[in-house]
Amino acid sequence: MADLLAVPLKKPSDIDVTKPLKNLIASVYSTSDKPVDYTEEINEFSKLRNNALWKAFEKYESSLELIYCYYDQLCAMETKIPAHEIQIPFKWKDAFDRGSLFGGRLSLTIASLAYEKVCVLFNIAALQSCVAANQTMETDEGRKLAAKLLQQSAGIFNHLKSTVLSSIQQDPTPDLKAETLGALSALMLAQAQEIFVQKAIQDRMKDAVIAKLSSQCDELYTEAYKLMQKESLHPLWERGDYDWLSVVGGKQAAYKGLAQYYQSLVCNAGKSVGEEIARLQYALELFKTAQQVSGKATFFQDFVNKAQKALTESKKDNDFIYHERVPDSKSLAAVGKAPLAKAIPMTEKMSASSKDLFENLVPVPVLQAMAAYSVRKTDLVNTEIMKLREATQLLNSILASLNLPAALEDTTGAEIPHSMQEKAASVKSSGGLNDLQKMLQELPELLQRNQEILNECNRMVKEEEDSDTQLRNQFKEKWTRTPSAKLTDTFKANVVKYQTIITNAIEADKKVRAKFETHSEGIYLLDGDISALQAALPACGSSGASKSSAACQLRKLMENVEAIKAERDVIESELNSPTSDMHDKFLSALAQDGAINEANLSVEALGRTYGSLSKQVQESLQRQEALIAEIQRVNSEFCKEKSGAGAAAMQREEMLKKLAAAHDGFMELQVNLKEGSRFYNDLTNLLVNFQNKVSDFCFARKTEKDELLKDLTSDLSKVTAGTPSIPAHHESAPPTPSSAPAAHSAPLPYPVQPQGMPHPYAQQGVNPYAAYAPMPTGYNPYAYPQAPYPQQQHPASYSYPYPPPQTGYPQQSGFPSYPGYPPQPPPNQQQQPPW
């Protein structure tokens, strides 16, 4: 069996991957109409991780398939789950650590899927070397598998050499440093070439071929030995009772000697006796050097014996027959090389049997494209709906100011007009004044709930950053993890974004309250008894104008008004109903071009779906302008015809106008309050998801912080103060009185902490952040739709103060706080120490 060196594996830690993944998938992919439940897949992923990472230490060939499948799963996840969103504190120990400190930290914890991939890939390469070392070299199958695994291992280490720093973006443990990985790659390649040499010898290939293979092996071991000789790497190679440098140095000399030995056989066949003797002498010197460097007296002893025997015979033949001059070894021609071992580049998939547990999740580029498309669609739909609603509100306000159509129906001057009776019935059937008051009372509670969640998120982010800053100031350059300030920019930007949304919603609530106060008296009359409404209307005599030609024209125009309103209801319904699924189109574009031109695809799809509806909206607005102008013209004639009416008639008309405006205000308030309630509940859903992300981030950072603190404080605890020398005058001191406790003669089994020195663990274990903010009572966080994070958008039908992506809330919906209910901060909590 070949004496191959096997790279030790990095040791992982047991961590909970289920909760962060559930939170992430729920916030990014799940909506109320399409809830996703990946509990089973996430549990399967957790099981796969445990089996793959821990069974690898058994170092069987079957373990390779498990870790291959896990790595393939990580690669698949990376394309579908935003890597920066995953907050799982992956902790890995240095592969070469045997319990002593050297060159850096013994372990490293980073909340990054890229870091997990790097460590798993290292263990794949290490496990390949272990399985190769366990193969028997007596069979072709064993040699073939070992050579293949070593070349694959060399390719992986070489790949990691150029990708580790860009993947984890901070100083790695010693085993993941570029110089370490370069040395390991060279070592694996040299060992693979060694197997080819052994096979050539066993298969009795031509001496010239074996010489060239050995010469190439010598070159590869020389390169590996050179890379391993770096001073910073020396502690890594001290393994057990021997160190790798001795083994590699010995093999380098041995295979150089082997190349000279087999080249001497070539010289023997060509009757070049002088060169043969020189090469045999040089080979024996190299074999002796190999035995001394490796520390093994029998290292390559078989070839030493063969070379010695051949040298004796060659010298005898040369002395009696050939009498050739023996050249100096330095003048010998270099032996040719036959490089068979090559680093095998990494393949896209490591296992043919691996299965993507999350195959139904869309890739990240598709997810981002769909989120951008959703923004464009929501903006377009909201803009068109807002045009229709603003136009309808304007039309209603103009008709109410003209007392239409009530003025046309008030023929007697004493009865309630039919249209006003319909308005009163509509208010009652819709819940009336009590319903509005109830919804108004709910808004402050919903607002306060959102403000408290956002305040808690802001507190956790600030506390984590303050803790990191304090520890960085304390430990200076030893505090080597990424500063929190660089990682929390997105969180702080989202806090500002959500606070702006809440502030605008407060302004919107204030406007809603003002509108309610304006129309509350009229709504009260419409919601009351018909007799009270009758009594509130001043009576007057009939003017007869309701039968004039102008009145007839106005009635026809009122029918046109109702027709326009009905058409707009249909258009709004159609704007909200189209669901053009861009999933397949984006997937096809990604598969075909490797990228997605979201802007072109989205604009084309939106134009095809909503182009005709946008045209109908524009036509409706133009028709309204002409209709309003005609109504105002005809109404002027109608007013002239009834200009003789008295003061009572004028008072009655003003009251009818007020009631008509109250009805319109009631309908608008009801829509605003319902959508406001839905807006706040949707915002709660977004904030809860945001809080989960912040909590996962803080937990991951706490785990990373605790590990770094443990390393640093362990370092400090090993530095014990030296025992001071006993002053001379103490040596002659009288014996201790019997009343005093006797001094212990044996040393304590632990170091005594000198007075005045802070204990290295004095401040460990303090939670750097408070518990998660409790969910508001009765709130179901999955009750409303969720848009992909972070580009959350609200349903297209909102007219309440939802925030379009760049333009802010619609101006008429922009809402500051009710008098007396500005958002209150949560009760003061005791300030926790930062670590």
Image (cartoon, rainbow, N blue to C red):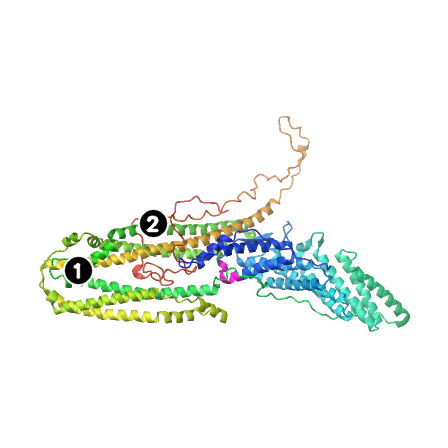
Taking the image as shown, residue 111 lies to the left or right of residue 379, namely: right
Q: Callout 1: helix, strand or loop?
A: helix
Q: Residue at x 78, y 68 (%)?
A: 262
- Tag on residue 445? 2
Q: Is residue 694 visible?
A: yes
Disc 2/disc 1 C-alpha distance (Å): 40 Å
Amino acid, disc 2: Glu
The range drawn in magenta is: 76-84
Main secondary structure along the magenta-highlighted residues = helix
Instruction: Answer with mark 2 or mark 1, whichever residue precedes in sequence.
Output: 1
Question: Quick one: 319 or 717, which is closer to the camera?
Answer: 319
Vertical side of 608 occupied by 242: above or below:
above
Crowd rating for badge 1 (residues with CA inside 10 Å; few <14, some 14–19, many 20+): few
Residue 271 location, quadrant = bottom right
Q: Residue at x 77, y 64 (%)?
A: 257
Amino acid, disc 1: His
- Reading the image, the residue beneath label 1 is 418
- Tag on residue 150? none
Taking the image as shown, residue 67 lies to the left or right of residue 586, namely: right
Crowd rating for badge 2 (residues with CA inside 10 Å; few <14, some 14–19, many 20+): some
Q: Is residue 518 visible?
A: no
Give the label, 2 or 1, closer to the camera.
1
